[in-house]
Amino acid sequence: MTQFLASVRDLGEAQVAVACGADIIDLKAPDRGSLGALPTEQIKQIVTALRGAKPISATVGDLPMEPAPVRAAVAAAVAAGVDFVKVGLFPGGNGPQTVRELQHLTRRGVRLIAVLFADQDPSIIAPADLWRAGFVGCMLDTLDKKRGSLTAVSPPSFLQNFVGSVRDTGMLCGLAGSLALDDIPVLSPLEPDYLGFRGALCRRHCRTDQLDGERVQRIAAALRTAASCPSSAPTGEPATPGRELSSRKLWGIG
C-alpha cells in the first residue's frame, strides 16, 4: 500500500497528522521555501513528543548544492533524532559532488532521501548514483508551487519511468508536489512507496496555513480506497506484497 506522508510545521500539526491517519510525519517550514527547514530545537521537541509513534523525516532547507552547508544541515537533523533526512537536489552548484561527499554519513547509517524537482532538472543525478552513494530513497517534487501539482507538470509516462527507475535500485520512492485528492487515483497505480502532501491538508488549500484534521482524514481515506481498489495495480503488473513488506520494514512501519 502506498503510504501517506504529511508535512507539518510544528508539534500541534504533527499530533493532528498522527491522530488523523498519516503514516509518515515530515517536518518542514513551508514559509521558508519548498523544503524549508525547522529549527533544530523544534525538531527535537516533536521527535521527543511523538516517541516513535510514526517514522519522522525532516527537510534540511533550500540549500545551495555545495558539500559543506548540506553536510552540516544533515548532521543537525540527525542529531535532532529524525529517522530520515530529505536533501533537495536544487539547480546550480555541484549536486553530484555534494551527493558523493554525503557517503561518509550514509556509511554510518544515516538514512538520506534525495528530492528531485520535476519542474527543474530532475536528471541532475540518476537514481542509481544516489543508491551507490548510500541513499535509501528518492522522491520527485515540484519547486514552483504556483505551477500546479506534479501531475500538471509531468506526463504520466515520465512519472511511471521515474518510479520504475527508483524501484529498480531498491530505494524508497516518493511522489509529491502540490498534490490534491484528485491526484491519488492517478498516482497510486504507479505504486510509489509514499505520496507526500502539504497544501491539500491545510485550510484554504494553502501550504502556509494551518493543518486541518478533516482534510488529513480525507487524504488518508482516499489512499486506503485506492489501495483496496483492484484497478489500482498497474495494467499487466501483479501486486508486489514482498516489496511492500520490505518498504514498510525500511520505514519502520508494522
Image (tube, rainbow, N blue to C red):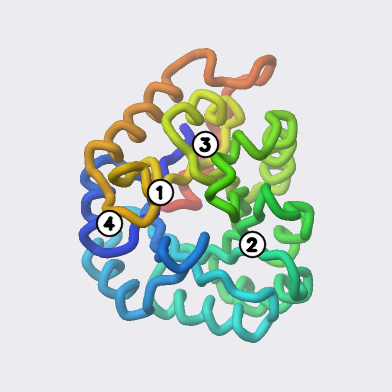
In the image, residue 250 above or below residue 49: above
In the image, residue 181 above or below residue 235: below
Name the mark on residue 14: 4
Q: Secondary structure at mark 3?
A: helix
Q: Which quarter of the picture shows residue 235?
A: top right
Mark 2 lies on residue: 135
> Is the C-beta separation of discs 3 and 4 under 8 Å?
no
**What is the three-letter code of the residue carrying label 2?**
Phe
User: Residue 71 placed where, x, y %?
Assistant: 60, 81
Q: Which quarter of the picture shows residue 86?
A: bottom right
Circle 2 packing at 10 Å, graded few (<14), some (14-19), many (20+), is many
> Is the C-beta separation of discs 3 and 1 under 8 Å?
no
Alpha carbon separation for disc pair 2 and 3: 19 Å
Mark 1 lies on residue: 198
User: Residue 183 placed where, x, y %?
Assistant: 50, 30
Alpha carbon separation for disc pair 1 and 2: 24 Å
Mark 3 lies on residue: 244
Circle 4 packing at 10 Å, graded few (<14), some (14-19), many (20+), is many
Alpha carbon separation for disc pair 2 and 4: 25 Å
